[in-house]
Amino acid sequence: MRALVLGGTGWLGRAIVRDLLGAGADVTCLARGESGGVPDGAELIRVDRRGPGAYEALGGDWDEVIELSYDVDLVEPALDALAHRAAHWTLVSSVSVYARNDEPDADESALLVEPTNLTEYADAKVAAERSSAARLGSRLLIGRPGLIVGPGDPSDRFGYWPARFSRSGPALVPTASGRFVQVIDVDDLAAWIGQAGRAGRTGVVNAVGEAHPMRDFFRSAADIAGFDDDLVEVDDDALLAQDVRYWAGPRSLPLWLPHSDAAFAQRSARAFQETGGVARPLDETLADVLADERSRGVPRPRRSGLTESEERAILHLGGSEHSPEPPSR
């Protein structure tokens, strides 16, 4: 199998390349290489895909092309240069393309956002899907992952929680009732992308794991980290009043979403499973991520979450009125 990965030097890209190599594929990666190199055994062609002649070094036909970008300035020139030479093409998209997040267990037929502003992530993803479908037709697989997690995650969203529970002291958590956590381990996603390409699977698939009640997620993360202090639930209004942010980024409680968007983490995994996708147990991913967080340093600066001092201040100002909930032992 001759495979081309458009990218391959970032976190997910490297996982995909490792899986392809493990299956015996001849793998070429086309990227600037600013995120690093590629796994041993793959060829890296260093090029700026926005530059003239970016695809000239790629000769011959390809059994599989994997596109990781959603930038129209990258996606469409790649299609122009390579669509006619690819037997199968996989576009990595996102469940962020859906217009509504209030429909639990919604599948791939759900309504998409209209791509009116390509500087917006969801809009750009939809535009990339439509451009790819127009050029590739029945040779295209669109994978829409949910939250991708695992060791090395540069976003710090999922890893915030096992890292936090590896420290002592009461832990601030959002009210968990009616909320869920749904993730896909980076290696499980890479394995599905590889086998789906080899099998020639096409269409649209939400690449997601099981939806776990958020309270169960907190308890699992606490158990794995050996956390034996209190979980202090603080309601949304109190958190927002103290400028705590949803989902990700500085001064956030990662994975916390408004109740109106709770179904973002409840997408149907049926098509993923039917196309051979396997999601490992959540506890396994949590254990791997905790080990990675400890190796990288729990107190390190991170892109998402609260600092220790921010958490203490919020608990002091807003948490004392709320009854703590001890973690399950």
Image: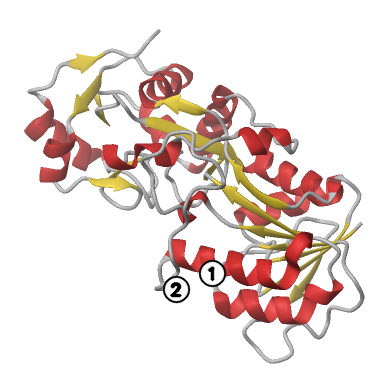
Residue underneath mark 2: 118
Residue 298 visible within the image = no
Residue drawn at point x = 30 percent, y = 26 percent:
176
The crowding category of the residue bearing disc 1, from other C-alpha atoms within 10 Å (few below 14, some 14 to 19, many at least 20), is: many
Which is nearer the N-term, disc 1 or disc 2?
Answer: 2
Residue drawn at point x = 54 percent, y = 53 percent:
94
Residue type highlighted by circle 1: Ala
Left or right: residue 169 versus residue 11 is: left
Residue type highlighted by circle 2: Leu
The reply to whether the C-beta atoms of the residues labelled 1 and 2 are less than 8 Å apart is yes
Left or right: residue 109 versus residue 251 is: right
SS label for mark 1: helix
Left or right: residue 186 versus residue 139 is: left
16 lies above or below 55: above
Residue 295 picture location, percent across and down: 53, 38
Residue 2 picture location, percent across and down: 90, 61
Quarter of the figure with residue 287: top right
Residue 189 picture location, percent across and down: 66, 43
Q: State the residue in front, 102 or 315.
A: 102
Q: Please identify the quadrant where the N terminus is shown.
A: bottom right
Which mark, residue 127? 1
Residue found farthest to the top = 329
